Amino acid sequence: MSDTVVSVENLSKAYLLGRQAKQDTFFGSVAAVVKSPLRNFRQLHRLNTFNLSEGGEENEDILWALRDVSFEVKQGEVLGIIGRNGAGKSTLLKILSQIAYPTHGRAKIHGRVSALLEVGTGFHPELTGRENVYLNGTILGMQKAEIDSKFDEIVDFSGVEKFLDTPVKRYSSGMKVRLAFSVAAHLEPEILIIDEVLAVGDAEFQKKCLGKMQDISTGEGRTVLFVSHNMRAVDDLCHRAILLDGGTVAANGDPSDIIKQYLQRNQTEIKTSFRSAPNENEEDRDAVLLTADLVNAQEECCDSIRFGEPFGIRLSWEHRKPLPSLSYAIRFSDHFGRLATACNTRNAFDTELDTAGRHDVVCWIDHSAFVPGTYSIRIAASIQPHTIVSGYSACMDLIVEEMAWKPQHMFTIKGEPSFATASRWIHTMGSNSMVASNDPTERTV
């Protein structure tokens, strides 16, 4: 017996867009009434011949929400579905939940399905929370004794026990999501379908939901289909991901790879350098970052570096007054916004950065251990211990390319590493130049 529980084959869904004619004059309204039988007949004919076999693909009145989507999901697998708004994610889940029917293709589902697609889906607003728990269980085909055995777990997980006998129409959106997810997760469906509704809940409850979904898939062997714009949650939770773009499957595979493709498709222009633009905010800064450039080992400006190659970040600052105990810092973040590494001038220079005037520094990283990808760079000047004088978030990007050879000890950490990297700093002011280093094994960044 195959362990495939969801099989989607060439699934397509088309919608016929309606147009409402506007009549601005009395005679126009009279003419519309006279013509309405003919117009209604034509619209009815279009609906009856909505097989899209002859010229339907080019019809501007037809919207293809899905086009030839095919994939399979194994038992116990967590599948992440990502894509921009309007890519077809919700339409796909509605078809799998049997709320909508496809125009072409088919979807085979083996097992009991519980879906959480929208806030309040499956709840009767006039019924209480308690009554809705039993209503949902009955719809899933469960006996009252089965629901009774799970009832306390559902209530405890949702955290809405004080409002259990209150009509659901009095619940906030967050309370509805809490109870809805708790019901969907605890009533033992073989397949759990979750749309982006978890974004309504608070951070603590979202963390509980993600943990519960992981338990469902690994410990209980049930299948989860998870749609989210939270790329970090998709990467941590899902075994596999598919990318929908324009109603078609653009990519299918490892979550980290699919997320990278998604972000590359939607990312703004890559900035490999920074130039200060005079504005009102700059006038209030005591230290202004004039320029920032990525340089290679030959001290030439470049757009990217290769894995393992040394590189530098060249900065030019303007201090408008003396700033005692000043230091510069550079933070590198990955495409999830997680800190990858950081380096600063703290303890590297004693008093050289305290004076007013122009200061040119280069931060050299001699042994780059960045995993290939794109990193966002934040640059700041601060007075010890933690007072930021001037900060520039996401002011430029670092692009790390693959090497022809694969390093033996190359790895990726999915957690939140917070570590410092060895760096050399060269400070130039006028004709004076000084070199200092920061070794993370000797001091903390």
Image (cartoon, rainbow, N blue to C red):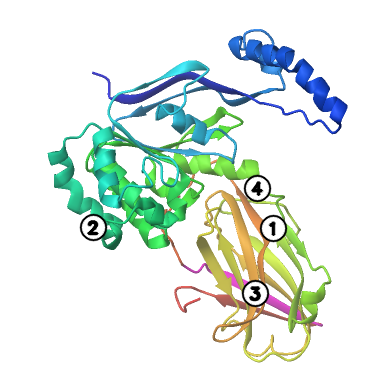
Of labels 4 and 3, the one closer to you: 4
Q: Distance between the Cα atoms at labels 4 and 1?
A: 24 Å
Q: Which residue is mark 4?
A: 267
Is residue 408 visible to us here? no
Q: Distance between the Cα atoms at labels 2 and 3?
A: 46 Å
Is residue 61 visible to us here? yes
Q: Which residue is mark 2?
A: 156
378, above or below 381, in the image:
above
**Element class at badge 1:** loop
Give me the residue at 69% from left, 11% from top. 55
Q: Earlier in the sequence, mark 2 or mark 3?
A: 2
Horizontal and vertical percent for residue 425?
64, 74
Query: Relative to residue 359, is residue 341 drawn left or right?
Result: left
Q: Distance between the Cα atoms at labels 1 and 3?
A: 22 Å
Give me the residue at 27% from left, 27% from top. 111
Quadrant of the image containing the N terminus: top left
Horizontal and vertical percent for residue 361?
71, 74
Instruction: Say if the magenta span includes residue 428.
Output: yes
Q: Amino acid at mark 4?
A: Gln
Of labels 1 and 2, the one closer to you: 2
- Are the two marked residues, 1 and 2, in contact with CB atoms closer than 8 angstroms? no
Instruction: Say if the magenta span includes residue 227.
Output: no
**Element class at badge 2:** helix
Tell me the quarter of the picture where residue 175 sits: bottom left
Q: Amino acid at mark 1?
A: Asn
